Amino acid sequence: MVVAIIAGVLLATASGACEGARSEYEALSLELALEKADAELSFSRERSIECLEVKALSLMLLGRSDEARVTLAELFSREIEHVISDRALAPAQRAAIEEARENVRPMRAAVKARWLVHDLLRLDVVLSGGLRDAAHVRYELELRPANRRSSGVVSFVGRVATATAAIPAGLEVSTLVVSGRVIDRHERTLHAFDNESLLPPRPPPPERVASDDGGPPWFVWAGIGAGVIGASVAIALLAQPGKPPCGMTAGCKELGE
């Protein structure tokens, strides 16, 4: 019975720990709200997540954006799905809150591979969770069982970074092993990953258009034949004595008429 009473008192104290700070915030006494929230947090930082919310909102409205982001990061790291409901927030402020939430989410990288043609493999690295200003991915590929290796750097467009790898014709490839690091613009590593997956069936190589005996294609011979016939006609006309009759040539007129 005594334990239940003590627990009830502690719960009531925790739930109302930031009521004063909340009241000051709603009255737009932002400096006083921040002071009361900080006082509660200095007493026990684990005491109430509501104090972190009031502190973050007060800092945001005071224009102290960097401090607000740090406070929001602490809030969401403790409770990622915590809902901040304040109808007075502007759309830009709501966007900043959701950005802070997403940046706290664990980053994950999924690797997807598919053949474009017989000798070209497409690789997509897709991020989920917090992006945290991810800019590039540095990757290393290993093709098995051929033990072929390559590496490169590709940039993210949104949440996806796409690379292509040239695979020699006839190389036996069934498994793709990808390891990489997601880095930001300052070359700081945000996330490291390793992935091993089976590749889909490789497309057949393109067919070569050639004659049955392996010589030049038919259209080459057709062009040569047309040139020979044209040359023969020109030689025959030039070999005739005198000039050709005008009656056989359209648009021709005899001199002296």
Image (spheres, rainbow, N blue to C red):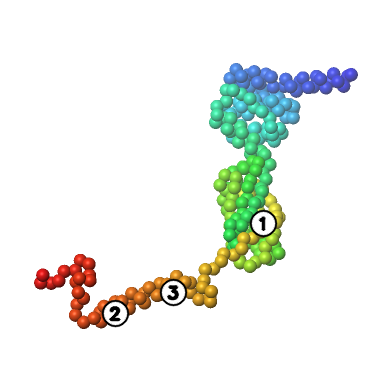
- Which of the pair 19/101 is nearer the observer? 101
- Which of the pair 245/188 is nearer the observer? 245
- In this image, 218 relative to 52: left or right? left
Q: Residue 200 carries which label?
A: 1
Q: Residue 221 carries which label?
A: 3
Q: Going from the N terminus, do you reach mark 2 or mark 1 first? A: 1
Asked where in the image residue 139 lies, by quadrant, the reply is bottom right
- In this image, 99 relative to 13: left or right? left
State the image coordinates of residue 102 (x, y, percent, origin top left). 64, 37
Mark 2 → mark 1, Cα distance in angstroms: 61 Å
Crowding around mark 3 (Cα neighbors within 10 Å: few <14, some 14 to 19, many 20+) is few
For mark 1, give the secondary structure. Answer: loop
Q: Residue at x 53, y 76 (%)?
A: 213
Q: Going from the N terminus, do you reach mark 3 or mark 1 first? A: 1
For mark 2, give the secondary structure. Answer: helix
Amino acid type, callout 1: Pro
For mark 3, give the secondary structure. Answer: helix
Crowding around mark 1 (Cα neighbors within 10 Å: few <14, some 14 to 19, many 20+) is few
Amino acid type, callout 3: Trp
State the image coordinates of residue 150 (x, y, percent, origin top left). 63, 61
Vertical arrangement, residue 220 with respect to residue 8, above or below: below
Residue labelled with disc 2: 235
Mark 3 → mark 1, Cα distance in angstroms: 41 Å
Amino acid type, callout 2: Ile
Q: Which residue is the extreme one toward the right?
A: 1
- Which of the pair 243/131 is nearer the observer? 243
